[in-house]
Image (tube, helix red, strand yellow):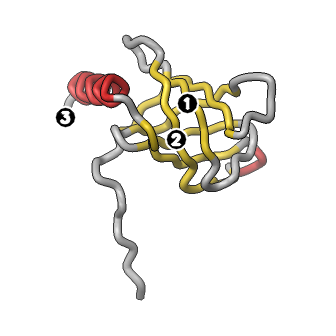
Amino acid sequence: MIESKERRCSRRIATRFPLRYRVIPVAGSGYVDGRVEDLSPEGLRFQCRDEVRVRSGMLLELQLPGELPAHFFGRTAWVRELPDHQGFEVGGRFEDQSTWGRKTIERFLKRDSASSGP
């Protein structure tokens, strides 16, 4: 049996909130809506209507609850079609992240974890 090594540096926290994204190179007229399913300072998993290619560059706008919109550049790591043609699930990592953006995510995750309780 082959063991899979976890490549993430930090644990992802299950959370749900809206995001908007654009695939690079930009093909459409604007951002497309999606929904974050889990998040870490290094990456995220989200659901969307349209298929995204693996390794595509993306402009991401996260509307973290209680925070100003945060913008990131990321890249898709994997894509799965959801059952019954309900859209796609996308795993991505942040490629170019400002210190402000990372601190915003860390602050949100700390606050969200504290409110969830044990």
Q: Are marks 1 and 2 in contact (CB under 8 Å)?
A: yes
Q: Is residue 89 above or below residue 6?
A: above
When the figure is inspected, residue 64 is found, relative to residue 76, above or below; the finding is above
Element marked by disc 3: loop
Going from N to C along the chain, the mark reached first, 3 or 2, is: 2
Mark 1 residue crowding within 10 angstroms, few (<14) / some (14–19) / many (20+): many
Which residue: 25% across, 22% down? 111
Question: Of label 1 and label 3, which has the lower sequence position?
Answer: 1
Report crowding for label 3: few under 14, some 14 to 19, many 20 or more residues within 10 A (C-alpha): few
Amino acid on which disc 3 is placed: Pro
Looking at the rendered structure, the secondary structure element under dot 1 is: strand
Q: Is residue 38 left or right of residue 29?
A: left
Label 2 sits on residue? 74
Q: How crowded is mark 2: few (under 14 residues within 10 Å), some or many (20 or more)?
A: many
In the rendered view of the protein, which quadrant contains the N terminus?
bottom left
Left/right placement of residue 97 relative to residue 25 reads left
Residue designated by label 1 = 60
- Residue drawn 52% across the image and 41% down it: 74
Name which of mark 1 and mark 2 comes first in the sequence.
Answer: 1
Which residue is at 67% across, 45% downward? 88
Q: Which quadrant of the rendered structure holds the C terminus?
A: top left
Q: Indicate the amino acid at tag 2.
A: Gly
